[in-house]
Amino acid sequence: MLVEESARGTRGHWGRFAARRARRLLVSLWILVTASFLMIQLVPGDPVRAALGTSAPADLVASRRSQLGLDEPLLNQYLGYLQNLLTGDLGESILTQLPVAETIGQRLLATLSLALPAFVLTFAIAVPVGVVMAVATRRGRRRRTELTFVGTSIVLGSIPEFVVCVALVAVFAVNLGIFPAAGRDGIESYVLPVLALSVGPAAVMARIVRVEMLAVLDADYIRTARAKRLSSLRVNLRHALPNALTATLTLSGIMLATMVAGTVLVEAVFAWPGLGGTIVSSIQSRDYPLVQSAVLTYGAIALTVNTLADVAIAAIDPRSTIGDS
Amino acid sequence: MRRDRPEVLRTPVGIVGITLLGVLAVLAVLAPLLWGERATATDTYDILAGPSAQHWAGTDNLGRDIFFRTLVATRLSLVLTLMATTLGVGLGLLLGMAPLLLPRRLGRPVVAFVNLLLGFPSLLMVLFLAVILGVSTTSAVLAIGIAIAPPFARLAHTLGAGVADLDYVAAARISGVHPLRVVVRHVLPNVAEPLVVNATVTASSVLLAFGGLSFLGIGVQPPQYDWGRLMQDGLSSIYTNPLAALVPGIAFVLTGLAFNLTGEAAAGTFGAKARSRARWRPTRTRRVAVRPSRPDEQEDARADVVLDVRDLVVSFPGPCGSISPVRGVSITLRSGEAVGVVGESGSGKSMTALAIAQLIEEPGRVTAERLDFCRTDLRSGSRAATDALLGTSLAVVFQDPMTSLNPVMRIGGQLAEGARRHQGLTRQDAAARAVDRLRAVHLRDPERRARQYPHELSGGMRQRAMIGMGLMGTPRLIVADEPTTALDMTVQRQVLDLLEETRHDHGTALLMISHDVSVVSSICDRVLVMYAGRIVEDLPSADLHTKARHPYTRALIGAVPDMATDLHAPLDTISGHPVDPRHLPVGCAYAARCPLVSERCRQEEPTLEADAIGEVACWHADEPARAETLEAVR
Amino acid sequence: MSRLDFEDVTVRYGHHTVLDGVSLTVPEGQIMGLVGESGSGKSTLARAAVGLAPLAGGRVLLDGRPVRHQGRRRPVQMVFQDPFSSLDPRMSIGQSIVEALPERLRRAPRAAEIARLLQLVHLDPARAADAPSRLSGGQRQRVAIARALAGRPAVILADEITSALDVSVQGAILNLVREMQRETGLTVLFISHNLAVVRYVATHVAVMAGGRIVEQGPTARVFSSPASDYTRELLASMPVPAARRHLSQNPI
């Protein structure tokens, strides 16, 4: 019978999904690496001269050039760059001549110690709030609550991170003096930066969760669940929520990656000794090897986040392991 | 949809957004002309001062007035935002539409490339481009414009490809319309609305990105200044004068809000579009005094009655009073009896099924003079009392097996959960029963099926699983709403056979809703014909083709060919449209379409009268169909 | 009058073969029915004939010459299943019809042509300026037929044109198809999953399964004495009124 053929094994899907996703990750990584390599090549004029300034002696410039391998043919430089990357050698800073890998390693830890709690906080706020709002305001009920929620979330989502930072500093550090205004020193120094990082994304994501949840609650399979006379709690949490979450994750994967980039601004306000401060100061001082590696690191984090989001979606919804590209 | 007023202006929120945008535009034009000099005037005696009557937000390190600097910076902030947005949106549109115009071989790489770029946050791309292009205002515009292009391209492509898949685009292509013209005339106009909305919201994020860059010192370079630059200057003196950083911050928030509120209002977030603005009002349907289910004398006759419904009314609140898609339906079903309900879409047949299954949701209202299932009154409204009964004795099968099963749960789990709740089975027992029920509905290898997800089953198998779900308990009644409409013909036969077998084996009653007269008459004992929320005829299905008396029933049968239809005669047609439940006529609802219509039909609504064959609601029930009239009114 | 020939037509999407060497002749001036279940490839066959599905092998011939997929004049036209997605919501129905006209006309003859086509499908010519949203499903399907006729086609492909319609208007559309074919002498390929509908409109019928034609011939012959098992299975699964079924099951 034709019918039986269409039933396929789930394991095959997972294998193919893993292969497809790994391929995509590798291609993305390759693009990232190549782009960061080309970055220095694309800088107009001589990057070393630009970094050291017009007054630097010509022989110093020349020696740094050869140190960076900029005199060799492009292909050799590229291969050398790839080889160094694989061995963990990210080169040396033009200005301080410290190994870049070391700097990045220290700074990355500080950045992640901000980003990870902010991730957790964002989800911890957005999912419950979104679900509760969806169930409470379904089918045009409680219009006032709905308007208040949507309005608040739009207002919060419209405030840029650095304005949130400044406002938080002005209120809690300057006026009330509860939390330190800057620096990374003790647990209380984390409160304001983590809050500043998660307020906007949490507001936006809570709205996404609500919209997705509303769509799911109108689905046929929710009617089926109600026809089984299950408890409302089970219908909402076991039947509706996982479906709403997959859609939310699809939409918010990019947003979470953006959050990592948002640390750049937050770190600038709080003088946080993280990767963000490094990338800004090195752009301003044209310390290209450092910029290059910082961009590479941020990109790699973003790609990891995206991949994790896809894996999470696949774990919840086995259908997503099928499909093209 | 009426186009007299743009969507945006129909909600207070949209009006606020547009007004804010207008104020900003005026400021951008006038502020530099009016206060340009005050904003750059230095006052060396008043450096880094706090707020005062003269300088409302204090002064900066050269003694310049921060409040006026913020107002004047409106122009540069907005102009840069618009430039970068225009660049990004234009680029995105080009990238997004290109795959629709290019041959597949060239189009796919473009899509793949855009998808890859999407993986990188735009701020990172901005920083990357800022390195290559150098630190300057122009390069910041370019960098941000390029960085916002991929998300916009993705949206444009997704929407565009959705429209390009529609039949009207295919029809245009078949007619020889040039691909470029197809995109311009068919695709773009139909995706313009969401794209404009998104561009508005994108403008808000461009504003923030630009502010961020200037704030970091790699955007606008002195002596030019925008809000981001002002914020950065203000941050250094935050302990002495917090307003120096907060005033430009407020400018950011207001502008961001202006863009976002306008965009969201246009997108219909605030309910202008989809929902009617009418509030939900409890409908005051006449609630007939609750009579207890009569015991004594009729007890014996009613012993095998599974479902007894009298005067069922379903109503929803509408903009002008409540709308009732079901208006007084009465159905009695005995054990093992199969009754079909047929009618056009909008006749209220599905609503009747949902109401009987107690699945009408707020704000819908169900009232009835009697609504007894297995001699239990379902009108009590207390879910606790009826859940166990309905959960074990009532099975519901829906139309689309593709969407009626939860895609993220295994089949076995979906069958088992109801039994665990209502029959108190343990996890293992429920799982074992689920496998047993899957076997009962003739699924091969039920153990494996139970472990699979719905997408791994074919449509027919899913519909069997749905029926199996209903058989977890001991169903007295199966309510099936178009159970085979989405299935192929050979699969339809199997599912119908399965329903018949269940009915035969367990004495289960069947209430089958279908638009297809032939399906209903092949499985049901009796057929109820519905029109405009009422039953107009009730007759044995064996008599359907020969003894139907309501002109609507006859037309319904005559309009659809079967294997015995006369090939030389035209099919029956029904003129006009189904009745809109909001505008019900006074007399017979079918009068406007009926070939037998008389003055009485337009004045008086016929009631359902019983006779030898069944029941019929028509003043001309016994008159033969006038074939020539049927033809004439077409 | 024209004849449409499919010669060994193969269509593949990726590794999936949707049409596997289909050869079929739609006789000139006749309505040929094409029946089969979902996934059998019947819609793809129609799409291949108008150039919407890429051919991996074989040819589609109109009167012995390959069908043109370029230029304004397209002799093969198609009517789609869903009347709600087959008309551009932003165009009046008149504009939709004008777009399908093979040559540009001045205002007056253009209006006359629209009126003629609308009358042909029994719609009031005054409605030419209406947006599709003001029309019912059945009326939209009439417009779609008028648009297909506007291209002055030799062959019309009708893909499940009644299955998205309410029962009460199906009869009217089927009557229209028969009447239109009688008046214009067009060649029609009428795709449907419903055997009774095909029996009513088509003089010839082809049965498809798994991307192949399993049987074809005059409708009366195929339905009364099917040669293939699959056709027999299809016919057996037709819902038969319970009364008649009991009779046929218990022959005395």
Image: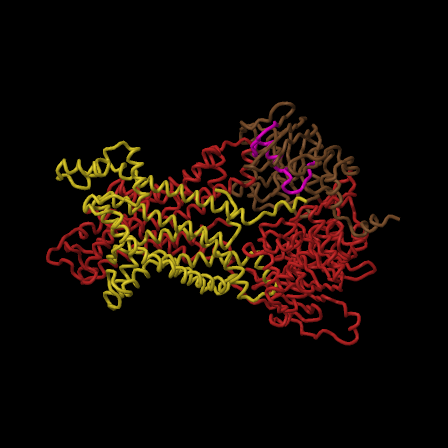
Chain colours: A yellow, B red, C brown
Q: Position of residue B434 (x, y in %)?
A: 64, 60
Q: Is residue B136 visible?
A: no
Counting every numbered tag in the picture gives 0
Q: Quick one: C109 or A211, which is closer to the camera? A: A211
> The N terminus of chain C lies in which quarter of the figure?
top right
Q: Position of residue C163 (x, y in %)?
A: 65, 44
Residue at 77% from the left image edge and 70% from the top image edge: B303
In this rendering, the answer to whether B220 lies above or below B296 is: above
The answer to whether residue B145 is left or right of residue A3 is: left
Specify the farthest residue to the top: C64
Q: Quadrant of residue A159?
A: bottom left
Residue at 60% from the left image edge and 40% from the top image edge: C126
Q: Is residue A196 visible?
A: yes
In this rendering, the answer to whether C38 lies above or below A169 is: above
Instruction: Give the magenta range.
Output: C33-59
Q: Position of residue C46 (x, y in %)?
A: 62, 34
